[in-house]
Amino acid sequence: MATYKILITDNIAPQGIELLEKVPQFDVEVAVSLSPEELKKKVKDAHALIIRSATKVTSDVIEGAKKLKVIGRAGIGLDNVDVRAATKKGIVVMNAPEGNMVTTAEHTIAMLMALARNIPQATASLKSKKWEKKKFQGRELYRKILGIIGLGRIGSIVADRANGLKMKVIAYDPFVRPEMAEKIGVELVSLEELYQRADFITIHTPLTPETKYLINKKAFAQMKDGVMIVNCARGGIVKEKDLYEAIQKGKVAGAALDVFEKEPPQDNPLLDLDRVICTPHLGASTQEAQTNVAVAIAEQVTDYLINGVVRNA
Ligand code: NAD
Ligand code: MLT
């Protein structure tokens, strides 16, 4: 009987690990927080590598992974994997694109509401024994325009929830047809029009060479004065230096950030601004979503190694 070494290098839910351990042909090892050198050593004899966002699967790591057949991402973003290098070596790269989409959309709505109503700042103030009612007056979302950049799985769910809040939802996505957007109650517009009309802007694209620093100085200049920005997609889509300046100048009234150019952020001046609220990449962090993605990736990797079936590659 062929045996396969399954290496898991980020924290995934136990339900996924248990499924893999039940497969007689699998020898499962969990080793998290590895240095790049340790990762290279461990992956040498692995047939499958299972990760979340912390493990960086560079071309260097892939080069030394002589037996690797599959990389499984328990989640959506593949920006931490050199997919091109893997594909060149015949390694299948798969993700679990559906298990955390509702959870991430819910986090986006939570961030939007917390931003509009100053909830983190007001909590900190009250806990320091102050009673600052006037300082924390917020904004209503009702009838405000939400601009969604990237109307894919998560963007569409955010649109649905925002429609429920009676916001007017507009979106920019060059790969979506207007009829499809219309069906879910969204008006598809150009990026320029979105910048001009939106009171709140939320980003839901992947990080690609095209979207890197998409939201920059030039983009902020086209936006409404006092716009609010939410980023629960990927650090690096918003240029942090330009966002800092736009907030300092009062052009942007506030930002809610779940993701950062460098994670964890180190000496990031955005974190010193009162107008910035933030979470440590918690978009997908619910028990439900983590179980979903761990089980999905365990099943997909098993299906590939045992039955040769490829899903979500
Ligand atoms: P998706 O592929 O379903 O949707 C992405 C959409 O972006 C697509 O419709 C695509 O057409 C669009 N798009 C691509 N390039 C674009 C561009 N230049 N301008 C406008 N639109 C563009 O992906 P998804 O599942 O909705 O995930 C979206 C993002 O959220 C990804 O970056 C993912 O990694 C991130 N994410 C973050 C968390 C978190 O924990 N914060 C959790 C899950 C996903
Ligand atoms: C994802 O792309 O799925 C997210 O980054 C969620 C995560 O794995 O934390």
Image (spheres, grey):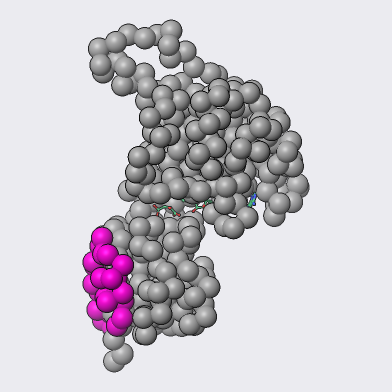
- Residue 169 is situated, as x and y percent measured from the top left of the image, at 65, 34
Q: Is residue 126 visible?
A: yes
Task: Quadrant for residue 8, please give it.
Answer: bottom left
Asked if 96 appears above or below 146 in the picture, the reply is: below
Residue range of the region highlighted in magenta in the rendering: 22-45
Asked if 14 appears above or below 170 in the picture, the reply is: below
Which residue is at 27% across, 65% downward?
A: 35
Q: Nearer the viewer, residue 224 or 242?
A: 242
Which residue is at 46% across, 34% downward?
A: 256
- Residue 10 is situated, as x and y percent measured from the top left of the image, at 30, 61
Which residue is at 29% across, 10% downward?
A: 130
| Quadrant of the image containing the N terminus | bottom left
In the rendered structure, the answer to whether residue 42 lies left or right of residue 54 reads left
Q: Nearer the viewer, residue 20 or 81?
A: 81
In the rendered structure, the answer to whether residue 162 lies left or right of residue 69 reads right
| Magenta-span inclusion, residue 37 | yes
